[in-house]
Image (cartoon, rainbow, N blue to C red):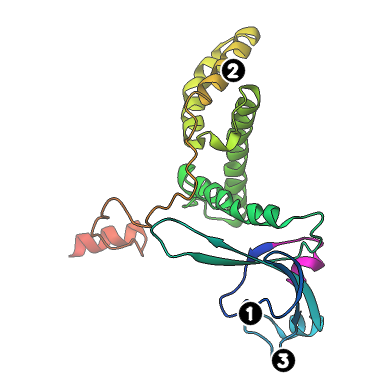
């Protein structure tokens, strides 16, 4: 927390389960909203070096917000949030809760980079080429997001409701036509592309929950831990 503030940044995250939430401590500033003082631990935690621990201030003020998630058929869950956004007049309780709820979009964006665009496996061998490969993925991702933003803005559809994978497929199909067309025709084709992108928006599914399982069974082959040349040699001598 102190490191985040030292970088002139703010954060909203879920409180660790080892900390108990009680309204008996702290300064209450609203319903389910209070200011808390966290004190420096007596011993250095495992995740910090000795120099980092010595640089910590004696105490830090944070804002604690808690709310309940009620889903029919499930046990009511309580969520406690910690944030460095202390001004309740500027950042209301509902805005903080809504901001934390948007963290799922970050997870989806990372999944798109790794799964949809295939960045989960980097194929370059040297550090410089790996950086270039990552930059290429980020450029492609930003290109797709800019198309989704343009399509959503022009046709009044929330960009986050558009499919990134669908946008990728449509763009690949339109690239030959865009390259072969003249300037005036290219503009018309581009507008058609944007219209197709917003044609099928992703339905809004609040509270969606999916199991973390694999749909298909993987093959029962061992991992490739040696070079292909060595493995071929083993086959020949077997």
Q: Is residue 50 above or below residue 151?
A: below
Q: Secondary structure at mark 2?
A: helix
Report how far apart the C-alphas of labels 2 and 3 lie in the structure: 62 Å
Label ID, residue 210: none
Q: CA distance from mark 3 to mark 1?
A: 14 Å
Extent of the magenta region? 1-11
Q: CA distance from mark 1 to mark 2?
A: 51 Å
Q: Position of residue 222 (x, y in %)?
A: 28, 63
Q: Are marks 3 and 1 in contact (CB under 8 Å)?
A: no
Q: Classify residue 69 as left or right of residue 186.
A: left
Q: Is residue 213 magenta?
A: no
Closer to us: 179 or 26: 26
Answer with mark 1 or mark 2, whichever residue precedes in sequence.
1
Q: Residue at x 59, y 17 (%)?
A: 190
How crowded is the residue under tag 1: few (<14 C-alpha within 10 Å), some, or many (20+)? few
Looking at the image, which is closer to me, 180 or 60? 60
Closer to the N terminus: mark 3 or mark 1?
A: 3
Residue 1 image position (x, y, % from top left): 73, 71
Question: Of all residues shown, which one is farthest toward the bottom?
Answer: 42
Asked if the residue at tag 3 contacts the one at tag 2, i.e. Cβ–Cβ closer than 8 Å, the answer is no
Number of marks in the image? 3
- For image coordinates 60% across by 34% down, the residue present is 159
Q: Does residue 170 appear to the left or right of 140 in the view shown?
A: left
Please provide percent x and percent y for residue 172: 49, 26
**Which residue position is annotated with label 2?**
190
Q: Residue beneath label 3, please? A: 42
Which residue is identified by label 1? Answer: 47
Instruction: Please identify, in this view, whether the residue under mark 2 or under mark 3 is nearer the observer.
Output: 3
Counting other residues with Cα less than 10 Å from the Cα at mark 3, is it few (<14), some (14-19), or many (20 or more)? few
């Amino acid at each position: 927390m102190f490191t985040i503030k030292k970088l002139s940044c703010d954060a909203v995250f879920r409180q660790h389960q080892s900390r108990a939430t009680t309204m008996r401590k702290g300064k209450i500033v609203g319903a389910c909203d209070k200011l808390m003082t966290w004190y420096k631990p007596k011993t250095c935690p495992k995740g910090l070096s000795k120099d980092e621990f010595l640089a910590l201030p004696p105490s830090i003020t944070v804002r604690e917000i808690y709310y309940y998630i009620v889903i029919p058929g499930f046990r009511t869950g309580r969520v406690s949030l910690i944030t460095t956004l202390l001004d309740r007049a500027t950042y209301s309780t509902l805005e903080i809760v809504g901001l934390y709820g948007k963290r799922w979009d970050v997870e989806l964006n990372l999944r798109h980079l790794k799964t949809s665009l295939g960045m989960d496996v980097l194929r370059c061998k040297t550090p410089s080429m790996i950086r270039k490969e990552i930059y290429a993925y980020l450029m492609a991702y930003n290109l797709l997001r800019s198309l989704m933003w343009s399509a959503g803005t022009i046709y009044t559809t929330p960009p986050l409701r558009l499919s990134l994978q669908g946008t990728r497929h449509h763009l690949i199909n339109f690239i030959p036509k865009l390259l072969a067309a003249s300037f005036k025709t290219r503009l018309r084709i581009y507008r058609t592309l944007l219209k197709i992108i917003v044609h099928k928006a992703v339905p809004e599914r609040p509270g969606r929950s999916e199991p973390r399982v694999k749909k298909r069974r993987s093959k029962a082959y061992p991992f490739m831990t040696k070079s292909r040349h060595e493995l071929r040699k083993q086959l020949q001598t077997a």
